[in-house]
Amino acid sequence: MPPKSEISLRARALADQAIVAALEADWPRAAELNQKIVEASPDDVEGRNRLGRAYIELGRLEEAKAAFTEVLRIEPYNSIALRNQGRVAALLEHKGKPNPTTTKTQPRLFIEDMGKTGILRLINPAPTHVLAKYSPGAECELREQEGLLAVHARDGELVGFLEPKVGRRLIDLLRTGNQYVAALVSTDPQNPRIAIREIFSSAENASRISFPGHHRPAETKERAYVRGTFFRYGGADEEGEVEEVEEAEAEEPTGEEVLEEAESTDEPLAVETEDDDDTEDEAEE
């Protein structure tokens, strides 16, 4: 029988491969790898949570339900399993089909460039069974709608709106040439959130900051917004909170580095608010 250290290394290697498969949206591979992990280590709750996420993406909801139920048998208060079990229940109740994540997760979106990236709350979110169709990390589109900035999933489904003042600011920046990418961070119906990142700033907006609440001129390094659990299981960590990690090196980290660094701290994430926007508006005046 191989020594425990060797078994541990093999398990870690399988887990790393499973994480990469999820980042690459290779859900059959992710399911296969995580199934191997739980067969070898039946009490591996991380492996079972990853397996459940892969089953959701594959539309295998009953199997996903069983995976999360087994996690809760081992750890009754596991927040990831509880949250995903609720998502699966909503889909099954409404005979809904999850909208699979088909594009590679871009960890770069979830790295904070001061003033260029923000985590924003959604107001008037879609019903629970609609939000349940989408996994955290799902790409979104921003559309102006009757003076508000609406957030739509890639299939066109409306998932919610940005708070009016924050939305109006971004509408103005969009109208004057800025470009953004966006992805869901949390589909929790009580606190749905979206990550938005500025990818192009027009000459007209050269002196304007997209997310003033995250602008700290004294700091130049970037920070990762989310913990590894976001990518591994498809959601925020404890009690639905998206968390921020310690400062990374100025050189852009790879997806795997984001995952590893994101394991280390429990700092709360600063979420963009209208008060933050007020401060910047006053400064501009």
Image (cartoon, helix red, strand yellow):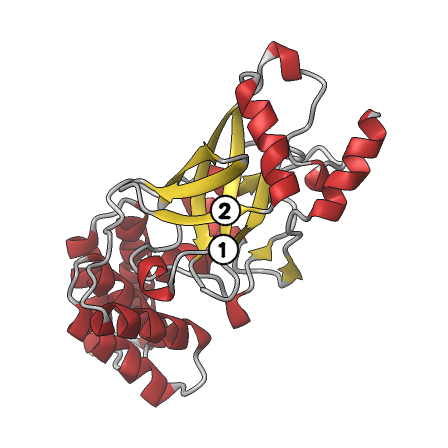
What is the secondary structure assignment of the residue under circle 2? strand
For the N terminus, the quadrant is bottom left
Q: Which mark is residue 161?
A: 2
Q: Residue at x 42, y 46 (%)?
A: 256
Q: Position of residue 17 (x, y in %)?
A: 28, 54
- In the displayed structure, 174 sits above or below 248; it is above
Residue at (50%, 36%) from the top-left corner? 146
SS assignment at label 1: loop
Q: Which mark is residue 29?
A: none
Disc 2 residue type (three-letter): Phe
Q: Residue drawn 25% across and 47% down? A: 25
Placement of 118 over or under 170, stated as above or below: below
Cα separation between marks 2 and 1: 6 Å
**Quarter of the figure with the C terminus:** top right
Q: Is residue 262 left or right of residue 269?
A: left
Does residue 224 appear anywhere in the picture?
no
Where is residue 248? Give x, y as percent.
Answer: 61, 43
User: Does residue 114 appear left or right of residue 119 in this picture?
Assistant: right
Is 198 located above or below residue 66 in the figure? above
Q: Does residue 24 appear in the picture of this structure? A: yes
Label 2 close to label 1 by CB (< 8 Å): yes
Q: Residue at x 42, y 59 (%)?
A: 187
Instruction: Say what amino acid the circle numbered 1 marks.
Output: Asn
Q: In the rendered image of this protein, does residue 282 appear above or below residue 234?
A: above
Residue 255 x %, y %: 42, 43
Q: Earlier in the sequence, mark 2 or mark 1?
A: 1
Within-10-Å neighbours for mark 2: few <14, some 14–19, many 20+: many
| Mark 1 closeness class: few <14, some 14–19, many ≥20 residues within 10 Å | few
Q: Position of residue 201 (x, y in %)?
A: 58, 19
Which numbered disc covers residue 124? 1
